[in-house]
Image: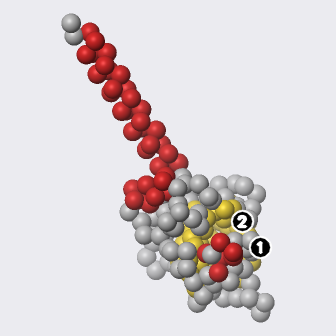
Amino acid sequence: MFRVPFIVATALIIAFAGGILSALSMLNASVGFGAIEVAGWRAFPTAQTASADPYAKAHRAKGGRLLYGSAEGLQFTAARDKDGLTLTGTCSYRMSGRTPTTRLWTLYAADADGNPLDAGAERPTAKNSQTVLRRRDGSFDIVISRTAKSGNWLAIPDTGAFQLVLTLLDTPAAASTGLSGLSMPVIEQIGCGQ
């Protein structure tokens, strides 16, 4: 007598649990489709627009983050160096080159969830276009390491994997027409255990 209701209840529990777990898996996988990748830097230019796919909208709502509008800016992340190796706090890196045309840019190191890393008091944990030292041609080098370096230095803690977050504000790169021909800085490993 209770066999049929038990089978139906079991089937419903499995269906609901499977649906919820698959949706959570998709939300944790990415911010949606439509990623662009330039020299190891990844951005999702359509994630903040009305035409974003449903998973991107749900990911944005779940994270509680306010993204930039397409006319405001674009955020790039890099979790690997130019050789494809994961960025880690036990190694030192040099980020060199130029950013795309922008009014202002910011750079900081973050964990996998995008939260800024704390390298300790009195240490430079972020850089921006107003404070970075440049060469005459406008290019720059920023050393990313746990030990102090001369020039442009971005401090990171001696932790596991991290990512660099480069935010371009008021840039034509945020518009769909500005995505072709972007020139991004190159990240190269310059040593480990230093």
Front in this rendered view, residue 90 or 93: 93
Rendered residue at 42%/69% (across/down): 66
Rendered residue at 65%/81% (across/down): 172
**Residue 166, position in %: x, y?**
59, 73
What element does badge 1 sit on?
Answer: loop
Rendered residue at 74%/78% (across/down): 97
172 to 57, vertically: above or below: below
- Three-letter amino acid code at disc 2? Val
Camera-near label (1 vs 2) is 1
**Residue 40, position in %: x, y?**
70, 62
Q: Which residue is mark 2?
A: 38
| Residue 62 visible in the picture | yes
- CB contact under 8 Å: marks 1 and 2: no
On-image quarter of the N terminus? top left
Q: Dividing the picture into quarters, in which one does residue 20 lie?
A: top left
- Three-letter amino acid code at disc 1? Gly
